[in-house]
Amino acid sequence: MTAVNGVVNEALRAHVTSAKFVLTLGGTHIAALVSVVARLADDRTTDEMLRDYRAGKGPLRDIDPPAGHPLRRAFRNPGMNGLIERGLLIHTMPYARNGRRGNDTNDWRPSEIWTITPAGQAVITLLREAGIWQEYAGALAPVEAPKATVPMIARKAS
């Protein structure tokens, strides 16, 4: 069996059970994938991000669109588990670091926690080609000030 870098994506293999398969993604899955990519692009720890923001040195990475945005609900109900189950995303908590366990991830970089699989990258490419990626990614513009807002997405009537 041939695989990417000699490794089979077991989660994707479990999802793809025959020569024909359906890979469905809801709005929460797309929002979750966009959110992870945004976190990876700004690979600061939460502590670094807050420190820089308070010092006026950088934007606050906002992982939710502002209130009233048409995509806010999709981002508020993340579909991370669905992405992991489909083999599109890998979530790893680096517990061994500093010899501690727990939920305090403020000093961990997103790249230490999240990995987008080659299958996930392929899905991103398809979403970009369809224009759906841009629609969701546009909802997560960096927040420059505490009360900044993102404009509503206007769609032309079909």
Image (cartoon, rainbow, N blue to C red):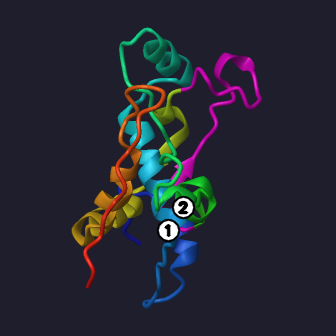
User: Mark on residue 74?
Assistant: 2
Q: Is residue 23 above or below residue 89?
A: below
Q: Is residue 61 above or below residue 133?
A: above
Most foreground residue, 3 or 54: 54
Q: Is residue 96 left or right of residue 136?
A: right
User: Mark on residue 17?
Assistant: none
Where residue 51 appears, as percent x and y from the top left, is 50, 12
- Residue 65 on the magenta segment: no
Q: State the extent of the magenta-drawn residues as a range.
A: 86-108
Name the residue tied to disc 1: 27
Most foreground residue, 55 or 6: 55
Secondary structure under badge 2?
Answer: helix
Q: Is residue 21 above or below residue 138?
A: below
Can residue 9 be seen here? The reply is: no
Separation of residues labelled 2 and 1 (CA atoms):
6 Å
Can residue 149 be seen here? The reply is: yes
> Residue at (41%, 60%) from the top-left corner?
120
Quarter holding the N terminus is bottom left
